[in-house]
Amino acid sequence: MLTCEEVTALVTSYLDGAMSWTDRMRFLLHVGTCPDCRSYLRHMRFVVAVLGAMPPEPIPDDVMQGLVHTLASWRS
């Protein structure tokens, strides 16, 4: 079974659906038996939902011009 430290390191992969079936089952087994990790997973889901609902912040014009200049210089 996974440790709590391993669960916290793998939570992003779990939420992204990027785990193998076996790893996902090991993750869920631990979360199902550990109230602290269950709470952590619940909080991480909340954070992902809140951040995902935020509108993207526009890139300031001076930063965009700097990026365009840098990328153009890489081409030549």
Image (cartoon, rainbow, N blue to C red):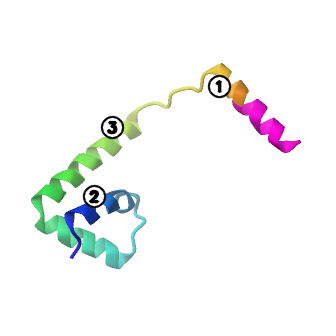
Q: Residue at x 75, y 35 (%)?
A: 70
Q: Is residue 11 above or below residue 76?
A: below
Task: Tell me, yes or no, whether the highlighted magenta stretch contains residue 4.
Answer: no
Q: Which residue is mark 1?
A: 63
Left or right placement of residue 59 versus residue 14 in this view: right
Q: Position of residue 24 (x, y in %)?
A: 31, 71
Identified by mark 2, the residue type is Thr
Task: Give SS at disc 2.
Answer: helix
Comparing 63 with 55, the one in front is 63
Residue 27 figure quarter: bottom left
Task: Provide residue 57's location: percent of width, then percent of height.
Answer: 51, 27
Q: Position of residue 3 (x, y in %)?
A: 21, 68
Q: Main secondary structure of the magenta part?
A: helix
Residue 25, quarter of the rendered image? bottom left
Residue 20: quarter of image: bottom left
| Precedes in sequence: disc 2 or disc 3 | 2
Circle number at residue 8 = 2
Residue type pointed to by label 3: Val
* 63 vs 74: above or below: above
Name the residue tied to disc 3: 50
Q: Going 40% across and 40% down the picture, which residue do you hit?
A: 52
Disc 2 versus disc 3: distance between alpha carbons?
A: 19 Å
Q: Which residues are magenta?
A: 67-76
Is disc 3 placed on a helix, strand or loop? helix
- Horizontal relation, residue 58 to residue 1: left or right: right
Spatial CA span between label 3 and label 1: 26 Å
